[in-house]
């Protein structure tokens, strides 16, 4: 991670923790732990369990009308496409957490 990424990450965490101006993240109780956890969470790939849970929730909105519930459906191709879509969406959302807010506003 380059220095700019660290500054962006620090700014995002400070906003999340609602630190007052000039308050140092590292001096706040557990600030370093929050920072490490935020970075780890924002940069990791989604787990199979996360993807599967979201797929089950979104299945009614994506399945064809003739398809049964998730557990009873044999629509493997549709399920795989939904899992891929969810994986991409989670990855994009986490990536957005590491970007400057100015760039997000431009999109």
Image (cartoon, helix red, strand yellow):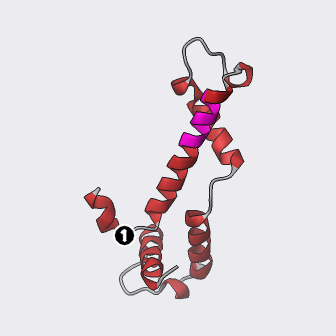
The residue closer to the viewer here, 4 or 29, is: 4
The residue closer to the viewer here, 81 or 23, is: 81
Principal secondary structure, stretch drawn in magenta = helix
* Circle 1 residue: 100
Give the residues drawn in magenta, as a range: 78-85
Q: Position of residue 2 (x, y in %)?
A: 48, 82
In the image as oriented, which residue stretches furthest toward the left? Answer: 106
Q: Residue at x 39, y 79 (%)?
A: 20
Q: Is residue 96 left or right of residue 52?
A: left
Residue 88 on the magenta segment: no
Image quadrant assignment for residue 96: bottom left
* Residue 61 in the image: above or below residue 88: above
Q: Residue at x 46, y 87 (%)?
A: 24
* Residue 88 can be seen in this image: yes
Image quadrant assignment for residue 39: bottom right
The residue closer to the viewer here, 13 or 17, is: 13
Report how many numbered discs are placed on residues in the image: 1
Image quadrant assignment for residue 104: bottom left
The residue carrying pointer 1 sits among few (fewer than 14), some (14 to 19) or many (20 or more) residues within 10 Å by Cα, namely some
The residue closer to the viewer here, 24 or 6, is: 6
Q: Position of residue 12 (x, y in %)?
A: 43, 71
* Residue 55 in the image: above or below residue 8: above
* Residue 18 can be seen in this image: no
* Residue 47 in the image: above or below residue 38: above
Q: Is residue 15 left or right of residue 61?
A: left
For the C terminus, which image quadrant? bottom left
In the image as oriented, which residue stretches furthest toward the top? Answer: 66
Q: Residue at x 55, y 64 (%)?
A: 42
Q: Residue at x 63, y 31 (%)?
A: 79
Secondary structure of the residue carrying tag 1 is loop
Q: Position of residue 93 (x, y in %)?
A: 48, 54
């Amino acid at each position: 991670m380059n220095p700019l990424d660290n500054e962006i990450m620090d700014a995002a965490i400070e906003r999340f923790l609602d630190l007052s101006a000039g308050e140092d993240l590292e001096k706040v109780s557990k600030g370093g732990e929050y920072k490490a956890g935020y970075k780890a969470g924002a940069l990791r790939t989604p787990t199979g369990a996360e993807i599967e849970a979201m797929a089950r929730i979104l299945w009614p909105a994506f399945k064809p009308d003739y398809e049964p519930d998730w557990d009873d459906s044999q629509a493997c191709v549709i399920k795989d496409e939904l899992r891929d879509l969810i994986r991409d969406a989670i990855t994009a959302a986490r990536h957005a957490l590491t970007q400057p807010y100015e760039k997000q506003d431009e999109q």
